[in-house]
Image (cartoon, grey):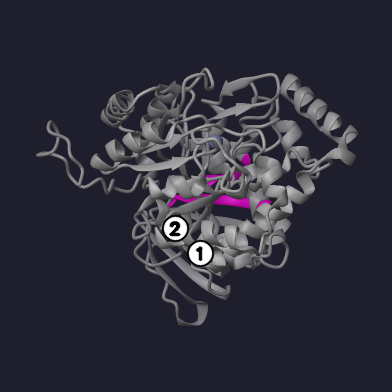
Amino acid sequence: MWKSAIVGLTLIPVALGAQSFTSLAPAIQPLVSVSDARVALTHVRVVDGTGKPPLEDQIVVIEDGKITAVMAAADAKVPPGARTIDLTGHTVIPGLVGMHNHTFYTTRGRSVQLQFSAPRLYLGSGITTTRTTGGTSPYHEINMKRGIDRGEVPGPRMHLTGPYLTGPGGAATMAQIGSPEEARRIVNYWADEGVTWFKAYTDISREALRAAIVAAHKRGLKFTGHLCSVSFREAVALGIDNIEHGLFTNSDYVPNRTPDHCSPDMRTSILKVSMDGPEVQQTIRDMVTNKVAMSSTLAVYELSYPDRPPLEERVLAALSPEAREEYLGARKDMSARAAESTMPELFRRAQAFERAFVKAGGLLGSGVDPTGVGGALPGFGDQRNYELLIEAGFAPVEAIQIMSLNGARILGVDKELGSVTAGKRADLVVIRGNPIAQPAEIRQVTIVFKDGVGYDSAKLIASVNGLVGIR
Ligand SMILES: [Zn+2]
């Protein structure tokens, strides 16, 4: 599957060992509040990430980075020498898997690589695994991942995506691909550099996309897209593995579409199509039949919805003064034009599309996408997604599943992580309160376990105050 002439003989399957507390750099260790190799979390509510109802009064046992038992408190034997943490009144959910989790950030005025603050915000918010889903500075992300894997940077386990692949005339940070030869060359270069995903962008041609997908698949790598010039159904036919953003980027319904061209009429066409009609059903059927997953990124689109989301003090505190001004300015402008906005209707349709996709058997993951006008921050916006998925009509346990196990399935790591299951890596989020009954409490993260090492969420988040928008 993994074809690499040079390292093929010595490559051991990439099941990295658990990252223990003692392997962390001295500068990182003070961010950890639970460093014991054996831990028993007692009297805790468990939402295991599989979509099953919550289990009350459980014990979760962690040994050497793995979950070794999840059981009712009454049956439990705590292993000798384990540190016991009484979590009465708390909930444990799986470490979240962020499927659209860039390490750069934008407002109307800036695009900044958050080399310092993004990994801390993700981990502190309970995101223990991410896919970068398009890099504007891929070497920053390659080196960030290495730093995290070596225990020098506090952050999530990262699945790297190469630079965005678009067509000639596309955005300046992207590979602008004019021919299939170019597509193959670029894919192979970044595959050699260690990325495991690629992402097409809005101006790619079908010919270039086909060549890029074939080249990625030859290397055992996967392909996703933020589409426009190529419609969902066309991309499915070309063999894409995953589609980003859901309905917002679907050009299947543009009348008299010019192929390979990103039409300005896409949004209008989505507002006009019948959500129960055959066209929408056909898109969903094509995706489900061909096992093409979808990533929900409601939190970033909500930024274009006038007077939403509710302003959060912690968001304003994390932003640098200039970025805060830019975000609040954009909000104000959108609010002033609220009467003309089509976003409320578009947003409802996108939510309905995600529900229909899952109902039809589709695999939906989610991620923040910390871009747009700058109000969906790494990690914080992932937590907002939880509320928006519930608003879309998913049960809270389904929303947790979308944000954890489903992401692990899309990444192909679900045997190893993604649910609170004995034998899996001890990637767990401890939450004060009950986010199943009170969704807003998803924000009340106290400890984030990654490989059984318990990070202090408050310390991680406090360490980036005022820095989002700068570094
Ligand atoms: Zn993106």
Q: Closer to the camera, 276 or 428?
A: 276
Q: Secondary structure at mark 2?
A: loop
- Identify the residue at the far front of this view: 256
Q: Closer to the camera, 169 or 147?
A: 169
Q: Residues within 10 Å of mark 2 (few under 14, many from 20)?
A: many
How far across and down, in percent of the image, does residue 15 sit? 27, 49
As for residue 471 lying within the magenta part, the answer is: no
Query: Given the image, on which type of amino acid does mark 2 rest?
Result: Gly
Q: Earlier in the sequence, mark 1 or mark 2?
A: 1
Query: Given the image, on which type of amino acid does mark 1 rest?
Result: Gly
Q: Is mark 1 within 8 Å of ligand 1?
A: no
Residue 418 circle label: 2
On screen, 447 above or below 143? Answer: below
Proximity of marks 1 and 2: CB atoms separated by less than 8 Å: yes
Q: Closer to the camera, 172 or 192?
A: 172
Residue 49 circle label: 1
